[in-house]
Amino acid sequence: MINDGYITALAALGGAALGGLTSFATSWTTLRTQMKAQRSASSKSKRQKLYKAFIDDAAKTYGDALIHDKLETTGLIDLHALVSRMRIMSSQPVIESAIKVVKVITDTYSQPNKTPEEIEAMISNGSVDILRSFGEACREEFEQSLQI
């Protein structure tokens, strides 16, 4: 016959083990959720920096293309490098929009140089804003990542 003391001791050990397991599972789940949120925030931050660099470089290179007919290869190479980095971490709409921007800039070099008056007219009618669709694609990507 089992002593009542043994039953009490086994019940206490079982309860302690179950409590410890529950505590471990809760801590592990919480840590995993925090790490996932941290990775997501880090990814978003990296993409924001990448998109900012692309916008800055594209704007400068496009401005150069509007007033020069000599191809600025350094700027275009930098843009292609940024697009390649986007292929690693960005959505397809963002990548496609970036490729279109680079194509517009490349095509602009082969067109006649714009006069200040022509550039002013382009600014007034909005045709100078070749980065609008890229910015919209980036915003959609960030909004979708918030929903996940």
Image: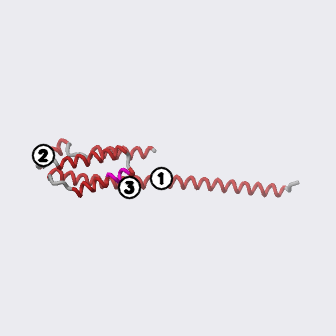
Colour basis: secondary structure
Q: Which residue has dot 2 on it?
A: 118
Quarter of the image with the N terminus in it:
bottom right
Neighbour class for label 1 at 10 Å: few (<14), some, many (≥20)?
few
Neighbour class for label 3 at 10 Å: few (<14), some, many (≥20)?
few
* Amino acid type indicated by mark 3: Lys
Q: Which residue has dot 3 on it?
A: 46
* Amino acid type indicated by mark 1: Ala
Of the numbered discs 1 and 2, the one sitting upstream in the chain is 1
Which residues lie in the magenta part? Answer: 83-87
Q: Which residue has dot 1 on it?
A: 37
Mark 1 vs mark 2: in front:
2
Distance, label 2 to label 3, CA atoms, is 37 Å
Residue at figure coordinates x 41%, y 44% from the top left: 144
**Lateral position of residue 95 relative to residue 110, left or right:** right
Label 2 element class = helix
The answer to whether the residue labelled 2 contacts the one labelled 3, judged by CB atoms less than 8 Å apart, is: no
